Amino acid sequence: MSSVFLCLQKLQKEAVLYIVRRSFSEITIMSEKALGRGTQCPPLAPGTLRLYSMRFCPYAQRTRLVLLHKNVTFETVNINLKQKPDWFKARNPIGLVPVLECDGKVVYESNVCNEYIDNVYPNPKLIPSDFYLASRDKLLWETFGKVTELFYEIPKSLADGTLDRCLRRFKRQLKRYEDELKQRGEYFGGSSPCMVDFMIWPWFERVPILSIIAPEAEVNSKEFPHLSSWMKLMMELPAVKETYEEPSAHIHFFSSLRAGNPDYDYGLS
Ligand SMILES: N[C@@H](CCC(=O)N[C@@H](CS)C(=O)NCC(=O)O)C(=O)O
C-alpha cells in the first residue's frame, strides 16, 4: 500500500464529523442520497430547474456555486456515478454530472451549464458582455486543467519519487492565476466575483488535502499573496459556504473512490 494511501487512511480515522448545512431556502434536495441503477427518476414539475449532481464532484460544484450565487430556484438529484440509472444516461450520453434539465431541455458539461445559467439568469451577470474580455475569462477556466491534473499527479508522485518536479509544475501553474489576480483586484471579477472565481474555486477548496499530503503544496501568503487573500474572501461568500465540504469529508470520499467503492452518501443520515 502506498504511503499516500496510508496517510489518507490515517486522516480518515481522525476525520471530524461532516456537518450538513442548509441556508438557501430555495434549494430542494429531491434526493440527497445518490440514486443508482434500478431507481425511478423523481418526477420533474413543469417550469422547475433540476440539477443532476454528485456531492463531492468539483465540476458539479461549479454549477451549484453559480446557481446559488444568483439565487436561482432549483432542485437537486444526486447520482450514483458507479451505478448510473438508465434515466440519467438518457439525459447525458457521456454519463457525467453536472446536468441541468428544465421542461425537456437538457444541458451538460460544467462550462456549458454555467454559460447557459448566465444567459438565462443574468442577475448578476458573471461573464462580461465584451467579447474580448469574455474570451480572456474563458481562457482562465478552460486552461485550469493544467492545475487540476496535478491534483491527481501530486499524490502519485509521492510514491514514485517525482514529488519535487510535480510541485514545481503546480506552483508554476498557480502563478498564472496569482499574476492575473494581481492585475484584476480582490476577485477575478475585480471588486465582485465573476464566472472565473466560481469555475476554479472547487479545487482551491481541495488544496488543504494536497497540503496534508505535501505541505509545500499549500497556497501560502508569501508565495501567493493575492490568491491566499482571495481564498479567504471566497470563503465568506454564501454560495461557497453552502457548498463547502471539510477536508476530512473530501479525504474520506477520495479514499473510498480510490478503493473502488465511492461513498457518495458520506455524512448523510
Ligand atoms: N468535463 C466535465 C467533467 C465532469 C466530470 O468529470 N464529472 C465526474 C464526477 S466529478 C463524473 O460525472 N464522473 C462519472 C464518470 O466518469 O463516469 C464537466 O466539466 O462537467
Image (spheres, grey):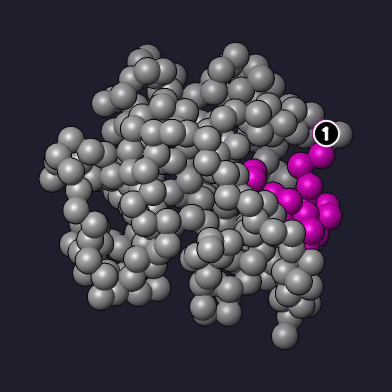
Q: 262 or 175: which is nearer to us?
A: 262
* The stretch drawn in magenta includes residue 214: yes
What kind of residue is marked 1?
A: Ser
The image quadrant of residue 113 is top left
Q: Residue at x 79, y 59 (%)?
A: 212
Please provide percent x and percent y for residue 199.
Answer: 49, 38
10 Å crowding of disc 1: few (<14), some (14-19), many (20+): few
Q: Which segment did they paint magenta?
A: 204-221
**Up/down of 53 relative to 176, above or below:** below
Task: Report the residue marked by disc 1.
Answer: 221
Please provide percent x and percent y for residue 18.
Answer: 65, 56
The image quadrant of residue 91 is bottom left
Q: Quadrant of the N terminus?
A: bottom right
Q: Residue furthest right?
A: 222
Q: 104 or 108: which is nearer to us?
A: 104
Q: 109 or 48: which is nearer to us?
A: 48
Label 1 element class: loop
Magenta segment's dominant SS is helix
Q: Residue furthest bottom?
A: 1
**Up/down of 118 relative to 38, above or below:** above
**Up/down of 168 relative to 177, above or below:** below
Q: Residue at x 69, y 54 (%)?
A: 247
Mark yes or no: residue 191 visible. yes
